[in-house]
Amino acid sequence: MTDPEERFATGTDPKADARTRDPKADARLTAPKADARPTDPKADAPPTEPKADASPERRRVARVVLLDADDRVLLMHGYEPDDPDQTWWFTPGGGLEGDESRQEAALRELAEETGITDVDLGPVLWTRYCSFPFDGRRWDQDEWYYLARTRKTEAAPRPKALTELENRSLAGLRWWTSAELSAAHETVYPTRLAELLRTLLDEGPPSAPVVLAPEIV
């Protein structure tokens, strides 16, 4: 393995695949949270896409909140290609291609960026609009965040399916515990991820996707 591959590879536990997950914990983290109050019958439906002419410039994005058997979340370490000192952490994911669905895009992007394909894709947890400068242009995105579970904790050393831009802007991957994320002094997107993850682990998925406040950088 070359030095760049070593930097990109995640920390792994060789016993991770041999562990048996708690089925009750998995069920709690894949089923929407129960709510005793009367609800709108449409509440459990996935969010609907905005009308095509409402925001034609917005990129449709699917992201994955990937948890392992120890409830750690996998984040990617990115940086500005022209300024490697400007770094941040974010969830795997990317834009839809062709006529694929958000679910299909989420699984494809996860495989391309991490090499992990053995996953159980769950519900949409959150949606948000974000706008930020990157690689000399502004990106306007409508993002959906899917919950997913895996028993595989070792990502590909340097996935071959990375795009040219991803190869110029990704430093690596890391599994984070909720406590580590809460104590981190590094930039993480979405900015409330530590709080959102803690709520997810404590309460399970929301009964309907939570609309996060827009983030405009």
Image: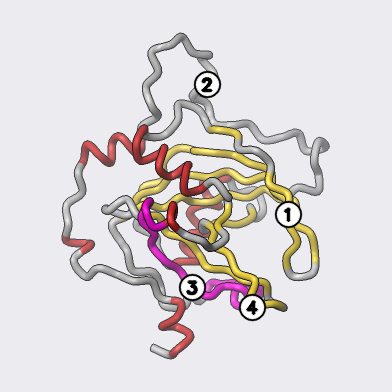
Mark closest to the chain's N terminus, 3 or 4: 4
Asked if disc 4 and disc 1 are in contact, CB closer than 8 Å, the reply is: no
Query: In which quadrant will I find the N terminus?
Result: bottom left
Q: Amino acid at mark 1?
A: Val
Q: Amino acid at mark 3?
A: Gly
Q: Is residue 210 above or below residue 151?
A: above
Q: Is residue 138 above or below residue 55?
A: below
Q: Which residue is mark 2?
A: 43
What is the secondary structure assignment of the residue under circle 4?
Answer: strand
Q: Which residue sits at x=65%, y=71%?
A: 86
Which one is closest to the eye, mark 1 or mark 3?
1
Give how far across and how far down residue 163 sits, in percent: 61, 72
Q: Which mark is residue 172?
A: 3
Give how far across and how far down residue 184 sits, in percent: 47, 59
Mark closest to the chain's N terminus, 4 or 2: 2
Q: Amino acid at mark 2?
A: Ala
**Residue 175 magenta-drawn?**
yes
Query: In which quadrant will I find the C terminus?
Result: bottom right
> Is 103 left, or right, of 217 in this rendering?
left
Q: Amino acid at mark 4?
A: Pro
Q: Which residues are magenta?
A: 161-180
Q: Residue furthest bottom?
A: 2
Give how far across and how far down residue 66 sits, in percent: 41, 53
Task: Tell me the distance, in whole angstroms, between the alpha carbons under discs 3 and 2.
Answer: 37 Å
> Is 89 left, or right, of 207 in this rendering?
right
Task: Tell me the distance, in whole angstroms, between the alpha carbons under discs 3 and 4.
Answer: 13 Å
Q: Which mark is residue 217?
A: 1
Mark 3 burial class by Cα count in 10 Å: few <14, some 14-19, many 20+: many
Q: Which residue is mark 4?
A: 84
